[in-house]
Image (cartoon, rainbow, N blue to C red):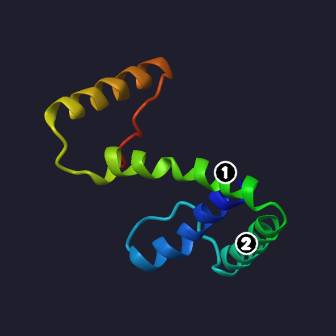
Amino acid sequence: TWVSIGLAVFCLPWLRWKHPEWERPIKVSLVFPVIYIIATIFITIVPMIASPIETGIGIAIIATGIPVYFIFIAWKDKPQFIKSIILSCNTTLQKLLVVMPPSKKN
């Protein structure tokens, strides 16, 4: 859990550096993410030394999301049948979970 949360917090300074033009709904001083990332590294390294097998299994479980990202997000020129499957799943889940699109700003 600490690895995934630490990676998510690492995205704050990364995205601020790579995309400063993007809107940030929550503005945070960079001090807090840096302190959190250092604490996360410490909290992750200590269990890796104490129980490397269990930690490796946890990191492997988190890493199973990497192919999902590349298949569904990073791969831009997908075949049409894959696009239709994704659209169908997306529409079904939106109806099932009663998801509304964000209102447009005027």
- Disc 1 marks a residue whose amino acid type is Ile
Q: Is residue 106 visible?
A: no
Number of other residues with Cα within 10 Å of mark 1, as a class: few under 14, some 14 to 19, many 20 or more = few
Would you say 3 lies left or right of 69 here? Answer: right
Write the residue at 63% across / 79% down. Answer: 30
Q: Where is residue 102 in the image (x, y as percent from the top left)?
A: 42, 40
Judge whether 29 appears above or below 54 on screen. Answer: below
Residue 57 marker: 1
Classify residue 9 as left or right of residue 103: right
> Which residue is at the front of the view, 80 or 26?
80
Relative to residue 7, is residue 98 depicted above or below?
A: above
Say what secondary structure mark 1 lies in. Answer: helix
Question: Which x, y percent locates residue 99?
Answer: 46, 28
Q: Nearer the viewer, residue 91 or 3?
A: 3
Q: Does residue 70 appear to the left or right of 12 in the view shown?
A: left
The residue indicated by pointer 2 is 36
Q: Nearer the viewer, residue 3 or 19?
A: 3
Question: In the depicted view, which residue is nearer to us: 30 or 40?
Answer: 40
Toward the front, the furthest residue is 53
Name the spot of residue 47 as percent of width and height, x first.
81, 64
Q: Amino acid under label 2?
A: Tyr
